[in-house]
Image: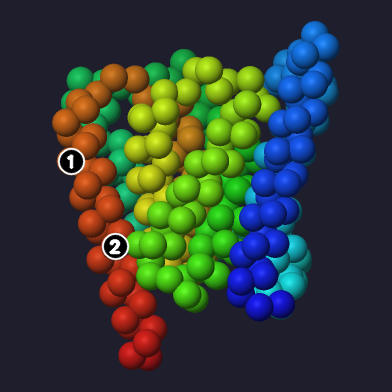
Amino acid sequence: MNRKNALALYLTGVFGQIWMVCIITFLLRNHGICVDFTTPIGLIAIGIGGTSSALWGIMIAVKYKKDHPGNILKAFVCLRQRYSSYLYVFIFLGLDFCFVLFGGRFQIDAWYIPVLLFVKAILFGGIEEIGWRYTFQPILEERFSYVISTFITFLAWGVWHVSYFYIEGTLSQVQVVGFAAGLLVNCFILSVLYTKTNSLWICVMTHALINVFSQMATGGNEYVQFVCRIVIIVMAVFIANQERRNVRCG
């Protein structure tokens, strides 16, 4: 399988699967059937749609990268990473959420809530990294620059999220501009972490933590948030380009 076919098959599979679930969800709701997190049929629909990027990521990784499903599973839960990898996570998340410290707060009703949210975020968020960061963007970067590849991933990931939110029944609650801006920054954070650490787990963990902190954060200074997001993107581009130069020289 060549690169072009791998990318085409991934996108066709991911969107074919999630859009089919969207159509079925639409038909069910049109017949008065509730499809969301509160119903068994809703959970099935969310599960099938939400795992589309991971399933097709695994298939393409096996066919194109000659990977093995067992290796992908090990990489997904490989907590043993270099200290520097976790340090990069801390730096980027610190920048991403430091705006909350200026007039906002993290609302924690009980100590176990963040733990439960984290586990949920691994299953309903972190798993996406198998497709987008482990498989899709690295293949893109074989042809395009880091920045262009990140933007392409952002666009595809954004369309995927809109479809997923429709299945969840939360699409009407999404603030498009704010969500798109946050998603773009997250794309740069997650992609540079994978470029720097070559670790699927680091991306899975970071994605889950972003989801958890986003749910707990309230208020904060928007100007600080804007500046920090610019800093994140500049840092990500610099680190990724530096890493690619090191690979070429090495």
Judge by depth and name the residue closer to the eye, 129 or 16: 16
Label 2: state its secondary structure: helix
Q: How is the image coloured?
A: rainbow
Residue at point 38%, 62% (across, down): 148
Q: Are marks 2 and 1 in contact (CB under 8 Å)?
A: no
Asked if 225 appears above or below 142 in the picture, the reply is: above
On the rendered image, what quadrant is the C terminus found in?
bottom left
Task: Tell me the crowding category of disc 1: few under 14, some 14 to 19, or many 20 or more residues within 10 angstroms, Cα based.
Answer: few
Residue tagged 2: 237
Residue 214, numbered label? none
Residue tagged 1: 227
On the rendered image, what quadrant is the N terminus found in?
bottom right
The residue type indicated by label 2 comes to Val
Judge by depth and name the residue closer to the eye, 136 or 68: 136
Label 1: state its secondary structure: helix
- The answer to which of marks 2 and 1 sits earlier in the sequence is 1
Asked if 147 appears above or below 20 in the picture, the reply is: below
Judge by depth and name the residue closer to the eye, 47 or 142: 142
The quadrant where residue 115 appears: top right
Residue at point 49%, 76% (across, down): 142
Asked if 57 appears above or below 90 in the picture, the reply is: below
Q: Position of residue 31 (x, y in %)?
A: 83, 12
Q: Is residue 157 visible?
A: yes
